[in-house]
């Protein structure tokens, strides 16, 4: 009731100028003293009308208490869905959820009505809600990387509860549970690098999101794409061409394809990748993050020769002698590869297999290590080097497709 609200406000000197995070520290006391909906509604009116707190602040101080069993709740972003966990089972979980709502609304650009619908409970106690989210992130989302987010957690000395809410919102802002789980993994790596406490790191783990991500991955494995290639792109053929290329002559589309396969390179990395004595830098997946050199590894063992061929291609692109397939909407390179029933992204995956073969991997673990190094996979990420769920039907020149041996680019475990 209003008297209880007044007492708590005066006890802690709460004001509308305080942040949502600061106010959330007093949520538990409000809910412990306001034991039914009537009292909570009276207290909300007192906070709004008497103390001039905003609706957002009132929602944090006295969140809605809703029970009931839950079906799947989905955030829909484009054609993707991400499952949200069932209703909170404790007061602490309810507080975290309310903070998460505010973060989704203020930082990730979800309207208040959408957030309310997302977390609402139907009359029968179930939840089955689809909410369309704008693909335009807020200004802060564009500016803050996951690494910067981890630094902010420690600089602002956020509590475990606030870190958990922030991490939950980060995961829910992804296109699906698999992408959300990946963001959380990256966040934990950043926190470990900053020597965050184990309690803070553990706060970013959500079993339900991990479970949903595993289900997505298992489903994708069942729909695995198998890559076949013609004799023209066998290891022997590609290696023979790479050994005979003369960098004093202009490169062509075939040269471009062979170098991309050799370095397991993405089209977007063609102008940025650099091979130095310290390692390889400039890989596209690392944009917006510290460009830490990764170990050089490719089907071309000679680092100087690999660097020479890469520079040859980059100079040709910069001079205009050959186009840049990394430019969005480029079709000419796709048309060239289509003659061989390939697409640009297949070159990277075939190259990882060839790298493992050339370096004579003698076990599954060694194969994954070498493939990961060819792909410039983060060595501190102990998951599979790629989770693209692809199988390359590896065969030698002259062998028939029936003689090909499936070469998995992910660990069966």
Image (cartoon, grey):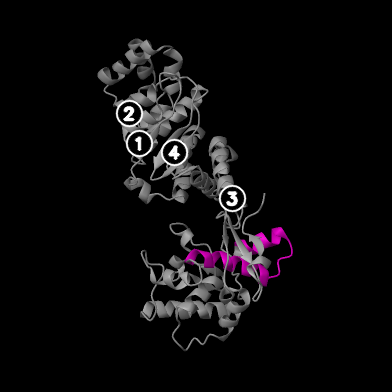
The residue at which mark 2 appears reads as 56
Mark drawn on residue 221: 3
Towards the viewer: 247 or 52: 247
Q: In this picture, which residue range is highlighted in magenta?
A: 344-372
Q: Tell us which disc is closer to us: 2 or 3.
A: 3
* Residue 54, image quadrant: top left
Q: Main secondary structure of the magenta part?
A: helix
**Per the image, is 363 magenta?**
yes
Q: Secondary structure at mark 2?
A: helix
The residue where tag 4 is placed is 169
Q: Are marks 2 and 4 in contact (CB under 8 Å)?
A: no
Q: Position of residue 332 (x, y in %)?
A: 39, 72
Position of residue 243 measured from the top left corner of the image (x, y, whole percent): 59, 83
Q: Which mark is residue 105?
A: 1
For residue 96, say whether it is visible: yes
Q: Is residue 202 above or below residue 377?
A: above
State the CA–CA distance, disc 4 to disc 3: 28 Å
In contact (CB < 8 Å): disc 2 and disc 1:
yes
User: Looking at the image, is mark 2 or mark 1 nearer the viewer?
Assistant: 1
């Amino acid at each position: 009731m209003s008297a209880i609200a007044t007492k708590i406000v005066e006890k802690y000197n709460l004001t509308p100028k305080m942040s949502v995070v600061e106010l959330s520290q007093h949520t538990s006391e409000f809910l412990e003293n306001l034991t039914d909906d009537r009292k909570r509604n009276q207290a909300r009116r007192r906070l709004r009308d008497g103390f001039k707190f905003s609706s957002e602040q009132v929602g944090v101080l006295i969140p809605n208490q809703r029970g009931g069993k839950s079906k799947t709740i989905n955030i829909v972003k484009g054609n993707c869905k991400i499952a949200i966990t069932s209703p909170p089972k404790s007061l602490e979980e309810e507080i975290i959820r309310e903070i998460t709502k505010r973060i989704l609304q203020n930082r990730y650009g979800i309207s208040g009505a959408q957030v309310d619908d997302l977390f609402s409970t139907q009359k029968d106690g179930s939840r089955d809600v689809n909410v369309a989210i704008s693909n335009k992130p807020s200004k802060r989302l564009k500016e803050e990387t996951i690494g910067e987010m981890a630094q902010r957690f420690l600089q602002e000395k956020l509590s475990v509860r606030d870190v958990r809410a922030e991490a939950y919102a980060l995961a829910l802002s992804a296109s699906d549970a698999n992408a959300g789980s990946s963001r959380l993994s990256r966040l934990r790596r950043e926190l470990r690098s900053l020597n965050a406490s184990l309690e803070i790191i553990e706060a970013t783990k959500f079993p339900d999101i991990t479970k949903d991500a595993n289900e997505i991955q298992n489903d994708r494995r069942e729909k695995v794409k198998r890559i076949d290639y013609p004799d023209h792109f066998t290891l022997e053929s590609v290696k023979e061409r790479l050994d005979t290329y003369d960098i004093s002559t202009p490169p062509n589309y075939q040269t471009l394809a062979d170098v991309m396969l050799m370095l397991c390179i993405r089209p977007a990395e063609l102008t940025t990748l650099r091979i130095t004595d310290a390692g390889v830098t400039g890989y596209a997946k690392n944009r917006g993050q510290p460009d830490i050199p990764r170990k050089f590894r490719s089907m071309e063992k000679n680092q100087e020769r690999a660097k020479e061929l890469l520079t040859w291609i980059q100079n040709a692109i910069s001079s205009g002698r050959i186009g840049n397939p990394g430019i969005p909407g480029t079709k000419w390179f796709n048309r060239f590869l289509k003659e061989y029933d390939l697409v640009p992204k297949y070159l990277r995956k075939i190259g990882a297999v060839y790298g493992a073969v050339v370096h004579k991997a003698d076990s599954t673990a060694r194969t994954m290590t070498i493939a990961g190094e060819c792909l410039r996979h983060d060595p501190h990420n102990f998951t599979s080097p790629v989770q693209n769920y692809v199988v390359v039907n590896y065969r030698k020149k002259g062998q028939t497709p029936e003689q090909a041996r499936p070469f998995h680019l992910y660990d069966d475990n």
